[in-house]
Image (cartoon, rainbow, N blue to C red):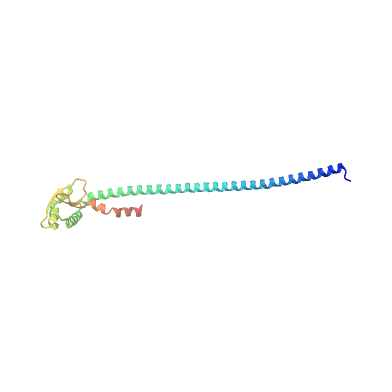
Amino acid sequence: MIKVDDKLKLFAKLVLEKVQNESEKKVNDFKRNQDTVLESEKQRLLKESENLIKKTRKKAENKKRQIVSKAVMDRQRALLKKRKEVYDRMVKGIRDMTSEFVDEPEYLGFLEKNIALGFSKFDAKNAVMLVTPHDMEKYYDSIKSYIDKYKKNDMNVEIKKADDSMLGGCIIEDADKTMRVDCSMEMVLEDNRVNIGKTLTDNV
């Protein structure tokens, strides 16, 4: 027959085992839960780190592109500025040479050629030819002979001085200034602007 003390001991043992089992279960559940939480937190931190790295890398790449783009633009601006300086010097040099060319014997050939070209494009009965004050004074007789040589037979032509800004050549207008043929040196320079620009592009 089981004594009361033995029953108490047995009961205590059963209770202790139950408490131990439940405690172990709770501990194991807690550990598993903590492992899940820790793993989730670890993944979250890893993802945040990757996003931060991507953002930092993207920011650095954008900054790099901005720096490169600015450097390219600065170089282009400097190159354009240099080309303009060279172009201005070249045009000034051409103008200086022109002021000397108008006193050379070859200039009369140039003038005759441009007068002939002007009349070939002009189709009014009354015309006004503009020439430089220099050419009017020095080459008036030659200009008159070129006009008689190349104008249409029924055309009336009046020779007038242009303003001092004109370099050479001639401009032919009708009396009402509704028709104009520009055969001046300025127009020759303008027509060759593309070639001058190409020369600069190839060499500067």
What residue is shown at x 37% (from left), y 47% (from top)? 77
- Residue 99 image position (x, y, % from top left): 22, 49
Point 79% across, 44% down: residue: 15
Total count of labels: 0
In screen coordinates, is 169 left or right of 61?
Answer: left
Establish if 123 lies above or below 30.
below
Q: In this view of the protein, which residue sits in the foreground, 168 or 190? A: 190
At x 34%, y 49%, the residue is: 83
Rendering coords of residue 24 (x, y %): 74, 46
Give coordinates of residue 200: x percent, y percent: 33, 52
> Foreground: 154 or 183?
154
**Farthest-out residue, left:** 154
Q: Which residue sits at x=54%, y=47%?
A: 51
Task: Where is residue 157? Give x, y as percent.
Answer: 12, 52
* Left or right: 184, with 200 as reference point: left
Q: Residue furthest right?
A: 1
